Amino acid sequence: MVDSAIAAAIRTLPKAELHLHIEGTLEPALALELAARNGVELPWTNVDDLAKQYEFEDLQSFLNLYYQLMAVLKTEDDFRDLMLANLRHAAEDGVRHAEIFFDPQVHMKNGTAFETVLNGLKEGARIGRERYGVTVGLIMSVVRDESVASADELIDVAAPYANDILGIGLDSAEVGFPPHLFEDVYRKAKELGWHRVAHAGEEGPVGYIEEALDLLHVERIDHGTHAADSPAMMERLAAEGIGLTSCPLSNLRLNVVDKPSDLPILEFMNNDMAVTINSDDPAYFGGYIAANYDILVTGLGLKLDDLARLAGNSLAVSFITEEERAALFAELEDWKTEHLG
Ligand SMILES: [Zn+2]
């Protein structure tokens, strides 16, 4: 357990969250509530039975449950409520700005219109900003184990709403679905003025990170855990200032690493990489963003000044305006004065 004064400091540390799937914030209780509200049949009828399913062997075993539960999300109100529940947690954990993934292809396959998903999330973000003071950008994520044609169609569906979308991402089952498949999709995304990020090097090899950089022209790598296998890649990521969105509890729960001391966070920091800390799918992996900072203290021995540096990285590689960035860095300086002396 992390010391209570440290835990409290972590929860006031001003930070940005850059790797979170809104569908991954669906808590068992809300999933059951929405299933009842929308008449969706699930194999579990109480929270305890459902919570018992949250033991995973790898990325695929998690994805199976994740996609099954996504079927309970149907209406604008559902997406609004999901966003609001998440932003309440985010605010409690000191998040000041969040760039949040959503997976329209899965919802559209479930019979929910793109506009329904987008409008609900936007409404949740609007209310959440007023209520909790957290700003939100939406990153539309392509499900890489769906066809490339489906990704292409998604771009066409989303294009009229280009201004409501901050960027494009690439997620889901990684191995066997290399970034180069989506070169054309990312070119179109760039033409629409979107930022570009992609999951790479979570379960996939370092070569997938290279493809994401060279062919998709991404500005951040999501996860990037396997960059640690290649000193040359770590040097490149540092030199190009590419942000990495690490998710410690996710890596542990999906057995990407065996134990906290195997997380390459310190190695990335020692190589001057812009590594950031995030929660990925917090409802499934045992904690929101602050719990991911906690594990760096208990598992890697990081100190508050290290955590402040990681939070600073998250502000540095956020897709916010320079004015917003300066304001958040000023908040971080105040926090440092208070907590680091
Ligand atoms: Zn992810």
Image: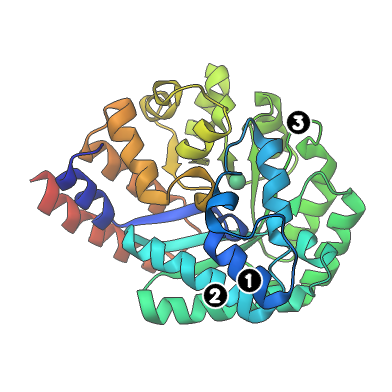
Q: Residues within 10 Å of mark 1 (few under 14, many from 20)?
A: many
Direction from residue 291 to residue 57 in the image, left or right? right
Q: Position of residue 136 (x, y in %)?
A: 49, 68
* Circle 1 residue: 34
Q: Position of residue 115 (x, y in %)?
A: 74, 78
* Circle 2 residue: 81
What's under tag 1, amino acid-wise? Leu
Mark 1 or 2: in front is: 1
- At x 45%, y 21%, the residue is 262
Query: 292 or 286, which lies in front?
Result: 286
- Secondary element at image label 3: loop
Q: Position of residue 125 (x, y in %)?
A: 51, 75
* Circle 3 residue: 175
Mark 3 or 2: in front is: 2
- At x 52%, y 60%, the residue is 99
Q: Residues within 10 Å of mark 2 (few under 14, many from 20)?
A: some
Spot the residue most to the left.
341
